[in-house]
Amino acid sequence: MANPSSPKTAEPTLATLQGLPSGIEESSVFRSLFIAYPDALLLVDQAGGIVLANPSAASLLGFAVDELVGLNVDALVPDSIRPRHAAYREAYGRAPRARPMGTQMELVAKRKDGSEVMVEIALSPLQSHGLPFVVAAIRDIGAYPRVKQALQRARYSDYLAQLGRLAVDTRDPQVMLDHVPTIAAEALEVEVAMVLLLESSRLEFRVASGVGLVPGEEIGARIASHANTPPGFVFAEAQPVEVPDYGSERRFAVPQAYLDAGLVSALAVPFYDRGRFIGVLTVHSRQAKRFGDEELRFLESLSNLLATSLQRVQTEEALSHAQRLESVGQLTGGIAHDFNNLLTVIQGNLQVLEELPAIAQDGYAQQLVGAAARPRGAAPSSRASCWRFHAGRCCSPTPWTRMPCCIRWPTCCGVRSTSASAS
């Protein structure tokens, strides 16, 4: 830093002072400059106490000027970094120089109400002028377009993360349907948001969920899907639709309820399930030209999350159905296996009966055994023969087996053999 007593430093200062109109004191000029400066200015002593503050500082930080005077600057730092800030301030006091503050980090100032604001801070020591103070110039950069855009994107990302966590935690599609309009309305700061699902007939939409809904569009209401309605126009266009001002909208018929509610602008985006149009997510605002590219990207991200969640639920239901069918198939296979085992036992008994001497000498018994052992196609005639032979003494066929009753002839028809008796 140059010596303030050198001619090169003093001459510009003297020339500036000499240029003042006569009768105006230098001290009043500097005090007026301090008060009128558009950036926040704080004069801080070596202990961190605020000695002077201009009105811009009071406005930025939410304090009165008198409240700032005597306050330690550490109180204007977020709690999470306050201990580090005190160490940085002490290190700066040992080697003060004019420089910007926090060039490698984002600086945030804490307001009186606890909220935070992004700032740029420049420090300038007055020790070279014989004063034990440091001037801190603080500028609010939250109003810069690039900063506002970055903050807006970060805000939208937080809401998307919130919906993403909900999509992972819940298996109920209605929970997602209920939360999407709420999140859209809060993030975009709009008055109306709703989700409309296209019915399977493709002829009308159903209002599935929403916030701030106008008369005629309550939850469960039906809206025609032809191109003269707001959602129907989105359906016909198959792309996002922005309405800068309902007063000049000519592409479709604007519902009178929108105008009565004071709605001026809108943004609607379609969402799909495997390329098939299934619904519309739409928001409305009372401000003209309220929506831009950032809002469009945010709304499309919301609709994509919603569509993915609905698709996942359908996939899980299909998988569950397939698993149930597989279980039924396994059960049927097991029953068939057991039934085959039973038929094998029956067939073995029939073979034993055929070899018995008593059966070999009885023509009718041979006929019954032959009918029972006959292939399935001959079952009806076998059943009829059995009934005729036993004159109604045979038990009736049962639904469980769907087989001729004469299969159970050894036990149900009164004919006994040695093997049957032994069994």
Image (cartoon, rainbow, N blue to C red):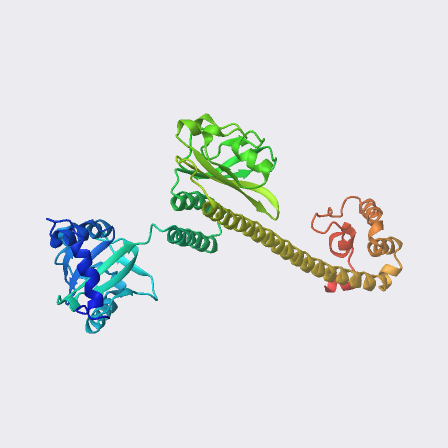
In the shown orientation, is residue 357 left or right of residue 201?
right
The quadrant in which the C terminus is found is: bottom right
Q: x, y (%) of residue 135?
A: 20, 61
The residue located at (70%, 60%) in the rendering is 338
In the shown orientation, is residue 365 left or right of residue 148?
right
Q: x, y (%) of residue 404?
A: 78, 50
Judge whether residue 74 can be spotted in this image: no
User: Which image quadrant is residue 51 in?
Assistant: bottom left
The residue located at (62%, 47%) in the rendering is 275
Q: x, y (%) of residue 29?
A: 15, 52
Residue 414 vs residue 151, the one in the foreground: 151
Residue 58 vs residue 235, the one in the foreground: 58
In the shown orientation, is residue 350 left or right of residue 133?
right
Q: x, y (%) of residue 26?
A: 13, 54
Quick check: 275 above or below 123? above
* Figure disc tally: 0
The residue located at (67%, 60%) in the rendering is 334
The quadrant in which the N terminus is found is: bottom left
The residue located at (77%, 62%) in the rendering is 344
